[in-house]
Image (cartoon, grey):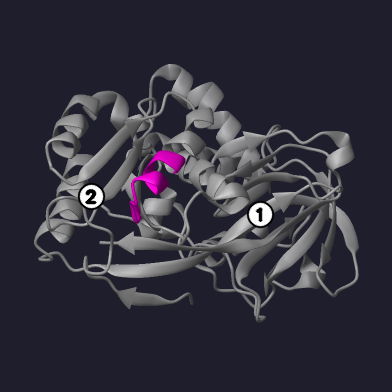
Amino acid sequence: MHATTPATARGFPTGTGAAPRLGVITNPHSGRNRRQLAEVRRLLETSGCVRHIVTEDSAAIPGALAAFAEDGIGIVGINGGDGSVAHVLTALMHASPFAAPPLLCALPGGTTNVTVGDVGIRGGLCESILKLLGWMHRGDVRAVVAQRPVIGVSGASGAPLGCGLVFGAGAVVDGIEYWQEQVRARGMRSELSSGVAMIRTLWGMVHGHDGFGEALRIGIAPAGAARSDGEFMLLVISALERLFLGIHPFWGGGEGCLYFTAIERHAAHFARALPSLLRGRAAAFMSRDSGYHSARLDSVQLDFRSAFTLDGELHHPAPEDAPMRVGCAGTARFLRI
């Protein structure tokens, strides 16, 4: 379990009034923001203590963060999807403009909002903004600071490929591609649409349907351990305590800061294992010998040549990037209400 501490608005940089200064980055193209952007602007830009920057693409995020740092802002709100959080973390881990790491606040502006479910402000988008403003102005909202490790991915040369909170390969990528090509393309963009994609992916894995959980040859070498090679249908590494719909598919022990699970292509009794897998409780037959791998680790070297995902964003590494290192790039503090 990762640490949490009570949070008060005291001790953060203030503007001309008594409230601490907050900077919010909004992705206008993310799920909920497309429908509620006008109301989001009204709430944030009339509050008197928020600097609000709408970024048209991820390339604008480092500039927005630099503007916040120059203003002495100590709390950074991220109003977008999980990918928006990943882009902010990447900018902060690689070249932060802040003298001290800011407190981050994940708002549910996306579609799936996995990060918000673990370390953000839950509820409707405008409701969450009002909770945040209430905490800042009056301190009448209960809040905690939750610390999480940040996953960093680098290529064989050491060049950074990105940061985030959830790394996935195999069926995780299949599910995202299915959502993009089959679900979103039909106009379904709500949180329910992500559930539809997950159920379809799991169904395809159980029944061996083409395009779901097909064999991915991966060489896996945890730090300090020997490399093992095999055909895997699913690989997930997470810094979060809960994923989409509260699932937690991790049960292995160890002292590392990241959760790791990999399922081999011909894992024994996969359909029977699925309920235990999603709850993070290993059934008696779920062992390495039967194709189920789970552990806590600090870093791992992965040798495969296929797409991976960081917080729902698809990445297509070049062949020369393999093997990649996935490990802890640092830590981030999130305001959770």
- Horizontally, residue 235 falls left or right of residue 248, namely right
Relative image position of residue 314 (x, y in whole percent): 62, 35
Residue 72 pos. (x, y %): 34, 52
- Residue 69 magenta-highlighted: yes
Q: Residue furthest top?
A: 186
Instruction: Please identify the quarter of the rendering in which residue 239 is found.
Output: bottom right
State whether residue 153 is above or below residue 13.
above
Query: Residue at position x 69%, y 74% from top?
Result: 285
Neighbourhood count class around disc 1 (C-alpha, 10 Å): few under 14, some 14–19, many 20 upward: many
- Identify the residue under disc 2: 123
In this rendering, position of residue 288 left or right of residue 98:
right
The mark lying in front, picked from 1 and 2, is 1
Instruction: From this view, report whether residue 257 is shown above or below residue 197.
Output: below
Coordinates of residue 155 in the picture (x, y in percent): 80, 46
Q: Residue at x 82, y 33 (%)?
A: 318
Q: Amino acid at mark 2?
A: Gly
Q: Identify the element where label 2 is drawn.
A: loop
Residue range (magenta): 66-75
Of 236 and 297, which appears nearest the observer? 297
Mark 2, Cα crowd under 10 Å, few <14 / some 14-19 / many 20+, is some
Up the image or down, 20 lies above or below 83; here it is: below
Q: Quadrant of the C terminus?
A: bottom left
Kindly tell me whether residue 77 is visible in this rendering. yes
Task: Determine the secondary structure under disc 1.
Answer: strand
Query: How far is disc 1 from disc 2 in space, using C-alphas?
Result: 29 Å
Q: Is residue 204 above or below residue 274?
A: above
Residue flagged by tag 1: what amino acid is it?
A: Gly
140 part of magenta stretch? no
Residue 307 at what x, y percent from top left?
72, 37
User: What residue is disc 1 on?
Assistant: 152
Locate residue 251 relative to residue 221 in the image: left or right: left
